[in-house]
């Protein structure tokens, strides 16, 4: 059995600790762990913040965000469906509906943008087609009414 005594106070220890002369004396190291100097510990948050800023800048440079395209497509679909419901309610009530038709025509006048989701784009195309059919039917009925009188 071998007995090892700790070095006396002020004695220089031989081994791996003395081989790290490039490290400043203020660094503290736990056994088996790496020491962090105050300069590297202070630099890490800055590096992380710079990396986050770069990531956000790259995302901001993209021409169109897919979520934004999807949000606009969903908004257009909801607006078209709401106007078709208004048209149906005005027909059932027997009220004139030129303002609803004008709003519906203005919504369908702009071309459909692709949202990046094929299923959503297909549904929006069907809604748009239905709106155009309803506009054509109401305009044809209005022409018949004005021509027949």
Image (tube, rainbow, N blue to C red):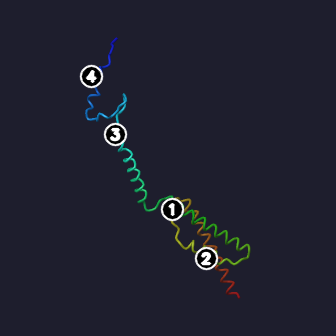
Task: Write down the residue under mark 4.
Answer: 11
Instruction: Identify whether 4 is placed above or below 66.
Output: above
The answer to whether the residue labelled 1 contacts the one labelled 4, judged by CB atoms less than 8 Å apart, is no
Label 1: state its secondary structure.
helix
Label 3: state its secondary structure.
helix
Q: CA distance from mark 3 to mark 2?
A: 68 Å
Q: Earlier in the sequence, mark 3 or mark 4?
A: 4
Residue 80 percent coordinates (x, y) = 61, 68
Q: Earlier in the sequence, mark 4 or mark 2?
A: 4
Q: CA distance from mark 2 to mark 1?
A: 25 Å
Label 4: state its secondary structure.
loop
Task: Write down the residue under mark 3.
Answer: 38
Q: CA distance from mark 1 to mark 4?
A: 70 Å
Question: What's the residue at 64%, 77% (across, down)?
Answer: 99
Between disc 3 and disc 2, the foreground one is: 3
Q: Earlier in the sequence, mark 3 or mark 2?
A: 3
Task: Write down the residue under mark 2.
Answer: 102
Instruction: Identify whether 48 is placed above or below 97.
Output: above
Q: CA distance from mark 1 to mark 3?
A: 46 Å
Q: Residue furthest bottom?
A: 149
Q: Quadrant of the C terminus?
A: bottom right
Disc 2 crowd rating (10 Å Cα; few below 14, some 14-19, many 20+) is: few
Residue 64 percent coordinates (x, y) = 46, 62
Residue in the foreground of this view, choosing between 94 and 112: 94
Q: CA distance from mark 4 to mark 2?
A: 94 Å
Question: What's the residue at 40%, 53% (across, down)?
Answer: 53
Task: Write down the residue under mark 1.
Answer: 69
């Amino acid at each position: 059995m071998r007995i090892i005594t700790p070095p006396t106070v002020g004695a220089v220890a031989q081994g791996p600790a003395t081989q790290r002369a490039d490290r400043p004396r203020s660094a503290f190291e736990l056994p088996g762990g790496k020491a962090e100097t105050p300069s590297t510990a202070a630099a890490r948050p800055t590096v992380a913040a710079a990396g986050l800023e770069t990531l956000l800048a790259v995302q901001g440079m993209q021409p169109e965000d897919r979520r934004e395209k999807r949000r606009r497509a969903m908004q257009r679909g909801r607006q078209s469906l709401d106007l078709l419901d208004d048209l149906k309610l005005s027909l059932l009530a027997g009220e004139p509906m030129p303002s609803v038709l004008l709003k519906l025509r203005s919504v369908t006048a702009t071309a459909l943008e692709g949202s990046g989701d094929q299923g959503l784009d297909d549904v929006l195309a069907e809604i748009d087609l239905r709106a155009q059919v309803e506009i054509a039917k109401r305009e044809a009925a209005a022409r018949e009414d004005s021509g027949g009188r």
